[in-house]
Amino acid sequence: MGSPICEAFGQNLRAIRKSKGFSQERLAHEAGVDRSYLGKVERGEVNITIEKIYLLAEQLQCAPSDLVPNKPPLNK
């Protein structure tokens, strides 16, 4: 698995995506990313770029800060 921060981000992304009624496939298509990449982001397996955070937030009609964990757990 990835870092605790990436995992927390992925959990936020998945929760918001589902609350907005998006499938992974639909969100990936509308944001211009690969569906398998989106799955890896949601599982916390990859460190997403700021640019992609903004693209996903735009499609989900939320603020980028809504996707970012408020107080991310840190690796120790």
Image (spheres, rainbow, N blue to C red):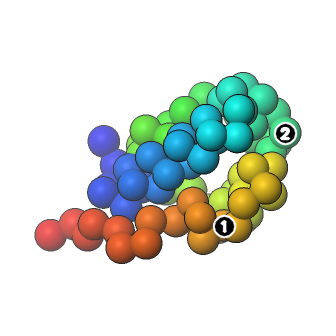
Residue 75 showing in the rendered view: yes
Q: Is residue 72 left or right of residue 29?
A: left
Identify the mark nearer the N-term, 1 or 2: 2
Using the image, determine if residue 25 lies above or below residue 33: above
Q: Nearer the viewer, residue 12 or 19?
A: 19
Q: For the residue carrying disc 2, how many other residues have a C-alpha within 10 Å: few (<14), some (14-19), or many (20+)?
A: few
Mark 1: secondary structure = helix
Which residue is located at x 44 percent, y 65 percent?
A: 69
Residue wearing tag 1: 64
Tag 2 secondary structure = helix
- Please state the horizontal and vertical placement of residue 16, each as a whole percent of the image: 60, 47
Residue 35, by quadrant, is: top right
Above or below, 60 against 22 in this view is: below
The quadrant holding residue 43 is top left
Quadrant including the N terminus? top left
Residue drawn at point x = 27 percent, y = 66 percent: 73
Q: What residue type is labelled 2?
A: Glu
Q: In which quarter of the image is residue 52?
A: bottom right
Q: Where is residue 21 in the image (x, y as percent from the top left)?
A: 71, 32
| Cα distance between the residues tagged 1 and 2 | 16 Å
Q: Which residue is under mark 2?
A: 30
**Quadrant, the C terminus:** bottom left
Q: What kind of residue is marked 1?
A: Pro
Name the foreground residue: 19 vs 65.
19
**Residue 37, visible in the rendered structure:** no
What residue lies at 66% left-to-right and 67% top-to-bottom?
64
Going by the image, does 6 lie left or right of 50?
A: left
